[in-house]
Amino acid sequence: MERKLLIKLRIGKGFTQEELAEDLGISTIYVRKLEKGNVNPGRKTMIKYEQYFKVSMKELFPDLFFDSGDTKLIEKKEVS
């Protein structure tokens, strides 16, 4: 799942993936994989992004956090 907010925020600052990677102290390949959703960040990386963009990690990486109020989890089905 592509993380569109990461891309939008980076482009909004006028940065390439390489420039952002340099500012965050991570590799360009890692930035690309994070944006495409091919890898999940570690806690330190999420904190770097959160502090850099001033946006919560839950907003930046919504696919990693679940809403505890979600009532559409698994439907019960009877087994015959």
Image (tube, rainbow, N blue to C red):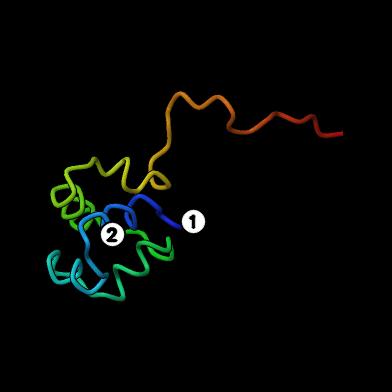
Q: CA distance from mark 1 to mark 2?
A: 18 Å
Q: Residue at x 42, y 37 (%)?
A: 66
In front of the other: 74 or 27: 27
Q: On screen, 2 above or below 68?
A: below
**1 or 2: tag closer to the N-terminus:** 1
Q: Residue at x 34, y 69 (%)?
A: 32
Residue at 19 percent of width and 47 percent of height: 50
| Mark identifier at residue 11 | 2
**For this view, does 34 lie left or right of residue 70?**
left
**For numbered disc 2, what is the local secondary structure?**
helix
- Residue 5 position, x and y percent, is 35, 50
**Residue 62 screen position, x and y as percent:** 39, 44
In the rendered image, which quarter is residue 68 located in? top left
Q: Position of residue 34 (x, y in %)?
A: 35, 63
Residue in front for this viewpoint, 33 or 79: 33
Residue positioned most to the right:
80
Q: Which mark is residue 1?
A: 1
**Residue type at the position of mark 2:** Ile
- Near mark 1 (Cα within 10 A), the count class, few <14, some 14-19 or many ≥20, is few
Disc 2 residue crowd, few under 14, some 14–19, many 20+, Cα 10 Å: few
Q: Quadrant of residue 71?
A: top right
Q: Vertically, is 78 above or below 1? A: above
User: Looking at the picture, which amino acid does disc 1 mark?
Assistant: Met
Which mark lies nearer to you, 1 or 2?
2
